Amino acid sequence: MTTKSKSPDKKFSKKTYRPISKLKTKELDEKGWNVKKTFIDPKTAQEILNERNSNPIDRVPEYTNRNLKKKGKKTDLLIRDIKANNFFPSLIKFDAGGQVLDGQHRLYAIAQAGKTVKMMVETGADRKSMIKVDRGCPRSIKDILGLSVFQEWGLDPKYWTHASTLGKAFFSYIEALKIKGSLIGNLSSFSPTDEDLFDFFNKERELIEWSAGTAKALRGRPKLHGRVFMIPLMFLRKIDAKLAESFLYDLQSNSSEKNPAVWVANYLAKQEGMNSRAEYVFHVQKVFGAIQTYIDGKNIVRKPKERTKLERSK
């Protein structure tokens, strides 16, 4: 004799399912440790920042997260992600006194974006847990692209460093040239979202894969596998692929110092470390100038050395 058994899954789901509610600040004062899903609206986020946030300068409570930086690339990206619905739930920590331990930048971003966001909220957290939480390192641009775009491409991980560095540098240079004002300032303020990067990398996939392979092949040549040389070369490749290959061939086989490709190799080999963005831009523009000379089919013409007064008197 067989009997029909009741579905434990259906029974369990009906009893335990609860709709996710909005966070109320009084919940932050509840005793004991608890973690829950909740919605945080802009008004509540701002209220928490006004009344329940402290920083290391205050020393109350101890082990709080870093000082709130209202202006910065990371904060700006958080706001933009929330506005674009590209933000995913993450954990905000409160101690037993209801004070924010971790999450002040996300709360600030919610308030500024003006949108309600689903979050995980931990209350009653041990303050000392922040010593361990803050020890983690943020993901690099290579990690972000490697976890998504590069794996979709099937790109060998040995090319990820060059592809991520050169792709983002090329993207930043293109965008900086579109904006009026200081090129150096525009490069410094460049702050794309992850989605901006994904779109650009997919659009320029062939060029980025080519540049990563070329840079890796040039690692034996001083300064030729870095951004200063590769960014102008990528522009040349985008304009005329055959001319870019010709430039690379001359760089490695031509011996005439008047040849722009040879001049670039010699020029970069003499440069010491580039310690500022201004130096980086200066040397990139030098390489751009030599490549333009190459495009024009001309040679590098050295200006005659100016004679001293003694030499002119003879």
Image (tube, rainbow, N blue to C red):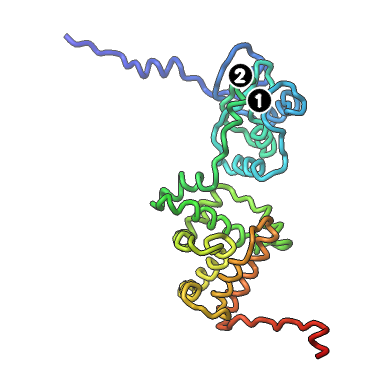
Q: Secondary structure at mark 1?
A: strand
The residue beneath circle 1 is 101
Query: Is tag 2's residue or tag 1's residue first in the polypeptide sequence?
Result: 1
138 relative position to 157: left or right: right
Furthest residue to the bottom? 314
The percent position of residue 312, horizontal first and vertical second, equals 80, 88
Q: Is residue 47 above or below residue 217?
A: above
Q: Which residue: 41% across, 48% down?
A: 151
159 relative position to 69: left or right: left
Q: Are marks 2 and 1 in contact (CB under 8 Å)?
A: yes
The percent position of residue 110, horizontal first and vertical second, equals 65, 35
Q: State how many labels appear.
A: 2
- Distance of mark 2 from mark 1, alpha carbons? 8 Å
The percent position of residue 17, horizontal first and vertical second, equals 47, 19
Q: Which residue: 50% across, 52% down?
A: 161
The local crowd at label 1, few if under 14, some if 14 to 19, many if 20 or more residues have their Cα within 10 Å, is: many
Q: Quadrant of residue 284?
A: bottom right
| Amino acid found under the numbered disc labelled 2 | Ala
The percent position of residue 218, horizontal first and vertical second, equals 48, 63
Can the viewer see residue 28? yes
Residue 125's mark?
Answer: 2
Q: Is residue 75 above or below residue 150?
A: above
Q: Which residue: 59% across, 79% down?
A: 293
Q: Which residue: 70% across, 60% down?
A: 278
Quarter of the image with the C terminus is: bottom right
| Residue closer to the observer: 95 or 232 | 232
